[in-house]
Amino acid sequence: MNNNGLKDFLRSLKVTYSAYNFIHAKDLEHNRGPYKDAGMRKFLFQSISSRDFAGLPKGEIPWLDKETSTDDIKKKLSVTNFSEETKATILSWKDNGYAILPGFFDTKTVDAVNKEIEDLLEAKKIEFTLGNKIMFANKASELIKGLTVKKELTDILDFLLGRRTTPFQTINFVTGSEQHAHSDSIHMTTYPLGYLVAIWVALEDISEDAGPLSYYPGSHKLPYLLNDGYERGGNVFTVGADSNYLKYEEKIGEVVKEKKLSKKIFTAKKGDVLIWHANLIHGGEPIARKGATRKSMVVHYFAEDVIKYHEITERPALL
């Protein structure tokens, strides 16, 4: 077995993750209270997946995922300081699973973020990983970190989930992701389900040939597709192989076709923000123009006081 083969084998073992998590135990304390509340009988450092919740109560889902009337939503919106435009897009959240905030970040702010990314790349404080992703720039930049907790933004996210939210990670792109359709809940998961929300920020005007973001309105209402819903593989000792993720994408494609979901393309303007539900199916369109950029930033937020983990790798989230 060569070094790469050995590395892949070790990464497939749940005990490997457990050992790593044990070393970083302080970063798992956020799950202690929620584990107790849910009746979860596991150590914080052990592997975890949706299978572990099978015999537990489902818990309280986000308030906008319940049978909530438009009048009730309007009543709660009436005491906020949100603009009328923001209130209107929040009202569509229950049916659509997304909200759009046009021009939320001004040109000066967006330009500063773009320069920050360029400077951090040049200084080798951040780098491209997993192809064209720049992960966790918020850990290297006070500017980006500050934007993720901008009160005018987090107030909206807190309202949508009915709980306080905390940024978990940022992902910056210079070019389009071209990622196949998926739901974030296979990657970043909560118990009860639904307590994740994400924002996508356009850091330049996005043209249709530059691989824009695409999404399927209303798809957030579908059952969550988790590890038991496709051929993930794995057993009591191992997690499923990374290559099996293709099976997940194929399954999502089948769902889109079976449910006859309609796709929307987000040709955003610089500074626009799109917020999406934890279970909204979305992806990146193919890049049709050679050399086209699609500068953008994604921020994922977890709600407080829920179990936070990664379904696909069966790992508790390190915060």
Image: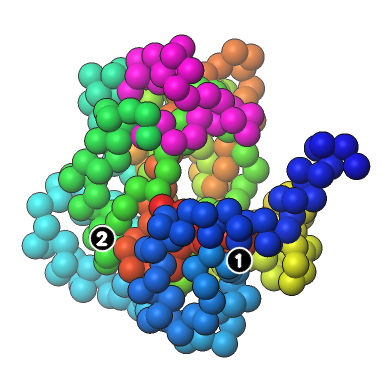
Residue 218 seen anywhere in this rendered image of the structure: no
Q: Quick one: label 2, few (<14), some, or many (20+) residues within 10 Å? A: some
Judge by depth and name the residue closer to the eye, 35 or 98. Answer: 35
Judge by depth and name the residue closer to the eye, 294 or 72. Answer: 294
In x, y percent, where is residue 68? Answer: 30, 75
The numbered dot on residue 164 is 2
The numbered dot on residue 310 is none
| Residue drawn at x 46%, y 84% as measured from the top left | 39
Q: What element carries label 2?
A: loop
Quadrant in the rendering for residue 60: bottom left
Q: Which of marks 2 and 1 is in front?
A: 1
In x, y percent, where is residue 256? Answer: 65, 56
Which residues fall within the magenta stretch?
A: 113-138
Residue 16 shown left or right of residue 109 in the figure: right
**Residue 127 among magenta residues:** yes
The numbered dot on residue 47 is 1
Q: From the viewer's perspective, is residue 47 above or below residue 280?
A: below
Residue type indicated by callout 1: Ser
Q: Is mark 1 on a helix, strand or loop?
A: loop
Quadrant occupied by the N terminus: top right
In x, y percent, where is residue 19? Answer: 61, 58
Q: Residue furthest front?
A: 23
Marks 2/1: CA–CA distance? 26 Å
Q: From the viewer's perspective, is residue 22 above or below residue 191?
A: above
Residue type indicated by callout 2: Arg
| Residue drawn at x 56%, y 25% as measured from the top left | 128
In x, y percent, where is residue 319? Answer: 41, 52
| Residue drawn at x 46%, y 71% as measured from the top left | 191
Residue 94 shown left or right of residue 179 in the figure: left
| Residue drawn at x 57%, y 43% as measured from the top left | 283
N-term-proximal mark, 2 vs 1: 1
